[in-house]
Image (cartoon, rainbow, N blue to C red):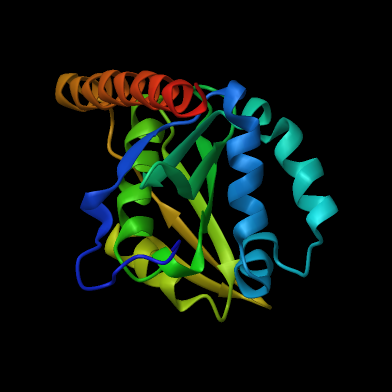
Amino acid sequence: MDAPDRQRTNAQDGVLRRLWATETRTFKEHLLRLDIDSRRLRFSGAVSDDFLIDYSANALRRAFAVFGYFADGKLRAVTELHGAMYSRTGEAAFTVEPDYQGLGVGTRLMGRVVLAARNRGMRHLVVSCLRENARMQRIAARHEADISFEPGEVIGTLHPRRANGFSLFQETVAETEGLARAMIDVQTGLLRTA
């Protein structure tokens, strides 16, 4: 059964790590599991399976960084950081599968993408969403975003602090742990297919 037990599952139960270009298939499978509303909220309109397949083909190479949340070995949520390295402004985009919404997963992903932006000298991190996406607006507000309401959308602008030794250390630990988890996932997958 794919749905989590909401009484036992929370964001801390899963693994949050960087996605690598070799995980395009995993990313595509995650996008295809999104329901109609989740797709519309992420892409600001209705999108087909073909659109998601095309999008996923190069998404992990186009984005500056992509972080995924894994539960029970499956990718269940993603945040993409777009923007050039050391540019002053970046943009973050999120997808969370319906059964994992409202569990703190988006908040955890936001913390990770803010840290990545901070350590790359980004002074502004923009998150835009449709007006009805109250969850995304709450996540942005929790991270002290300046919220502005535009026609048809809401724009949250976060202002990451300047990088320091501790923030760089935090990211190094997260990246090392994530790489180790990715290697374990690969080995586990090989054992399952053997």
Q: Which residue lies furthest to the left in this view?
A: 166
Query: Residue 149 at what x, y percent from top left?
Result: 55, 75
Query: Residue 87 at what x, y percent from top left?
Result: 53, 28
- In the image, 6: left or right of 82? left
The residue drawn where x is 32% and y is 22% is: 175
Q: Where is residue 22, by image quadrant?
A: top right
The residue drawn where x is 45% and y is 37% is: 67
Query: Residue 124 at what x, y percent from top left?
Result: 45, 43
Q: Quadrant of the N terminus?
A: bottom left
- Placement of 74 over or under 1, stated as above or below: above
Query: Depth check: 83 or 19 in front?
Result: 19
The residue drawn where x is 77% and y is 45% is: 53
- Placement of 17 over or under 8, stated as above or below: above
Q: Where is residue 57, by image quadrant?
A: top right
- In the image, 59: left or right of 176? right
Query: Depth check: 112 or 127 in front?
Result: 112
- In the image, 183: left or right of 176? right
- Placement of 52 over or under 37, stated as above or below: above
